[in-house]
Image (cartoon, rainbow, N blue to C red):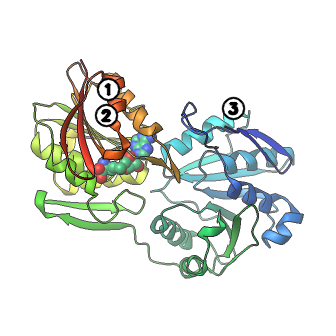
């Protein structure tokens, strides 16, 4: 796997997070390179973007995956002896940890960075904003709408993406939600869109609400949460096949909106529920769903965390519910499921159960057998399987 990122006369050593994932994926992509070049080099900027940044003061970076943008701009400003103040906004804990790891690894100062999660606001005095186009366009639209509240007319916003993701509809979406936009020429199959904010405030559409009548629940989902406006079919199969037992500490691992944990709280009303997700919007939604569905405040606990890494050390759950992700950003990968299963084995109390739903073709039983030395099929249908492994 390549780790040397060369851009704008800089040499950086960049890794994904977590670093030890068994994958040949890089920590940056050509869109990062294009964006950094557009911001730093006159010659390329002339063909790619009409905008050349003259100061790195009060610049916001949105959706940087693992520091390709934050590390490059930090290193560039240091080399040019330029003042630097960056607002780095991310929904994913693993991105924040990846950016921090790469700054440290490249001996780059992080004192000039102000971190913002996706559910908070950026300040009003930004000079420019750079954005990596996220996969989820509802989330992107919300980001534009929120920017329309704080950016004065004339502020440049540069948005980088694969050329195949950029079309007339996307430019219209940007124009409608922030200001006029035009796309650059193609560079390594990517383009940079330059938008100039028009100073008009747009209403924000933050939460989608929908009922799950079978379980008398009402779900609220923020825009970057998995299964945004309906029950996921894997989650539905899990809800129909919940485990039996007498549980006291239950973890909903990769909770999304928290639907599995909410159902567990109905079935095991004495238990404490621990909701864990890498997405800040997921954790915020799960918390809102816990309160609006009137569960006991003191029994709900919420962790913005990469797998179980942020859980208090003395917590030993007796049940972990898990509908694992099989991608990280745009990359298909099974390393998160692996990490979730390994963390579950480490943290469960003796006799505790990991209860998993997955697509049949993902063959999670092979991983569970390797880690737990046991695995039982609880239910299956044409598409999904529910598996249980016990810590012995
Ligand atoms: C398939 S969804 C399941 C959501 C929900 N539990 C359900 O069944 O509808 C997987 C969830 O795992 C979360 N996730 C991804 N990577 C993670 C990580 N490293 N640590 C914790 N959660 C993660 C995603 O944000 C997503 O909400």
Residue tagged 2: 365
Q: Residues within 10 Å of mark 3 (few under 14, many from 20)?
A: few
Q: Quadrant of residue 34?
A: bottom right
Element class at badge 3: helix
Q: Is residue 183 above or below residue 92?
A: below
Residue 209 on image: x %, y %: 27, 67
Is the shortest distance between ligand 1 and the CB of mark 2 under 8 Å? no
Label 3 or label 2, whichever lies nearer to me, is: 2
Q: Earlier in the sequence, mark 3 or mark 1?
A: 3
Residue tagged 1: 369
Outermost residue toward the right in this view: 43
Viewer-proximal residue among 294 and 1:
1
Residue 370 on image: x %, y %: 36, 24
The residue lying at 34 percent from left, 37 percent from top is 364
Element class at badge 1: helix
Viewer-proximal residue among 247 and 178:
247
Q: Quadrant of the N terminus?
A: top right
Residue 373 on image: x %, y %: 30, 21
Element class at badge 2: helix
Q: Quadrant of the C terminus?
A: top left
* Structural distance between the alpha carbons of marks 3 and 2: 36 Å
* Structural distance between the alpha carbons of marks 1 and 2: 6 Å
Q: Which mark is residue 105?
A: 3
* Structural distance between the alpha carbons of marks 3 and 1: 36 Å
Whether residue 26 sits left or right of residue 237 in the image: it is: right
Q: Residues within 10 Å of mark 2 (few under 14, many from 20)?
A: many
Whether residue 391 sits left or right of residue 53 in the image: it is: left
Q: Which mark is residue 193?
A: none
| Residue 101 in sight from this viewpoint | yes
Q: Are marks 1 and 2 in contact (CB under 8 Å)?
A: yes
């Amino acid at each position: 796997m390549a780790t040397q990122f060369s851009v704008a006369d800089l040499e950086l050593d960049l890794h994904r997070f977590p670093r030890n994932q068994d994958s040949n994926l890089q920590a940056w992509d050509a869109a990062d390179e294009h964006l950094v070049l557009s911001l730093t080099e006159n010659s390329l900027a002339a063909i790619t973007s009409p905008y050349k940044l003259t100061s790195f003061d009060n610049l916001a970076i949105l959706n940087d995956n693992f520091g390709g943008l934050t590390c490059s701009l930090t290193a560039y400003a240091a080399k040019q002896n330029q003042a630097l103040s960056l607002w780095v906004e991310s929904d994913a804990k693993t991105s924040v940890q990846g950016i921090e790891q790469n700054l440290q690894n490249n001996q780059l100062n992080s004192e000039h960075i102000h971190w913002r999660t996706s559910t908070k606001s950026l300040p009003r005095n930004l000079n420019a904003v750079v954005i990596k186009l996220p996969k989820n366009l509802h989330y992107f639209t919300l980001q534009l709408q929120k920017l329309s509240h704080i950016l004065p007319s004339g502020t440049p916003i540069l948005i980088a993406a694969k050329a195949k993701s950029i079309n007339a509809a996307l430019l219209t979406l940007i124009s409608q939600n922030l200001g006029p936009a035009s796309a650059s020429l193609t560079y390594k199959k990517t383009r940079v869109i330059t938008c100039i904010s028009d100073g008009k405030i747009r209403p924000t559409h933050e939460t989608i609400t929908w009922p799950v009548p079978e379980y008398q629940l009402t779900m609220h989902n923020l825009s970057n949460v998995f299964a945004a406006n309906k029950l996921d079919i894997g989650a539905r199969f899990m809800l129909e096949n919940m485990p039996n037992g007498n549980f006291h500490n239950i973890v909903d691992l990769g909770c999304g909106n928290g639907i599995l944990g909410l159902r567990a709280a109905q079935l095991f009303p004495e238990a404490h529920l621990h909701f864990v997700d890498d997405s800040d919007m997921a954790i915020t939604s799960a918390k809102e769903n816990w309160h609006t569905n009137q569960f006991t405040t003191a029994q709900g606990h919420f962790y913005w965390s990469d797998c179980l890494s942020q859980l208090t050390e003395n917590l030993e759950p007796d049940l972990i519910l898990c509908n694992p992700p099989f991608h990280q950003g745009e990359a298909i990968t099974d390393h998160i499921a692996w990490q979730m299963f390994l963390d579950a084995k480490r943290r469960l109390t003796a006799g505790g159960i990991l209860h998993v739903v997955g697509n049949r073709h993902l063959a999670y039983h092979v991983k569970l057998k390797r880690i737990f030395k046991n695995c039982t099929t609880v239910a299956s249908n044409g598409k999904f399987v529910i598996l249980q492994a016990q810590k012995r």
